[in-house]
Amino acid sequence: MFWALFLILVCYLIGSIPSGVIVARRAKKIDLRKVGSGNTGAMNAYRALGLKGGLTVLGLDALKGFAAVFLAYFALLPDFTLPVVKVIYGFAAIVGHNYSPFLKFKGGKGIATGFGVLLALSPKVAVLVLLLWIGLVALTHYSSVGSLAASATAPVLMFIYKDHPVYIAFGVASAIFAFYRHKENIQRLLNGREIPFHAGAGPAEGSRGR
């Protein structure tokens, strides 16, 4: 049991690795928290570093969530607990991404890391919500619209495809968490002040969203 609990901390620390900050510093010697929206996630990395940088951060952040779920197989617990352990470990990585001790307990929105968790739990649903995200971002030019819609749709699709009830519960919890983390974006969308997907990088401003 101690080992399983210790792995929760490991998953949190894996999630807390600031991929975007590291990639931006190595690629252009810039602090991602001080450009564009100030967010450390893939979307702001795309604005600051271009497509290659954005995809690199997206992949690394998703890998954090996927790896956390994979660690559940090493928890040394009974097999019937595996679905619950997968969800707990995956969510620990999402929390780590959002509240990283390496960034004074700040971070991104957890969408890419959450996608990595979803990919490990329900690959078919993960592909569908990714396509939904791409379609809505292309249509609206707002990443937050795609992220919120994908987050809300994931548990519905998981229910339709009869995924494990624990996985569906994860989908609901992660959607609620995503909406909470996007509350400022939602307000800016309502006010017509949200940052478009294609917006270029610049100094981070308090009035601009993550």
Image: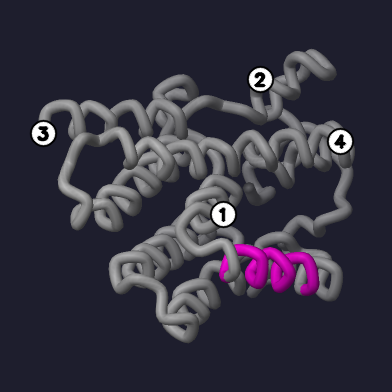
Amino acid type, callout 3: Met
Q: Could you tell me residue 108's position as x and y percent?
A: 55, 41
Q: CA distance from mark 4 to mark 3?
A: 41 Å
Per the image, the residue denoted by label 4 is: 52
Per the image, the residue denoted by label 2 is: 22
Q: CA distance from mark 1 to mark 4?
A: 19 Å
Tell me the chief SS of the magenta region.
helix
Q: Is residue 52 visible?
A: yes
Q: Which mark is residue 1?
A: 3
Residue lying farthest bottom?
Answer: 160
Q: CA distance from mark 2 to mark 1?
A: 20 Å
In the depicted structure, whether residue 83 falls above or below residue 135: above
Q: Earlier in the sequence, mark 3 or mark 2?
A: 3
Per the image, the residue denoted by label 1 is: 115
Q: Earlier in the sequence, mark 3 or mark 1?
A: 3
> Which of the pair 143/58 is nearer the observer?
58
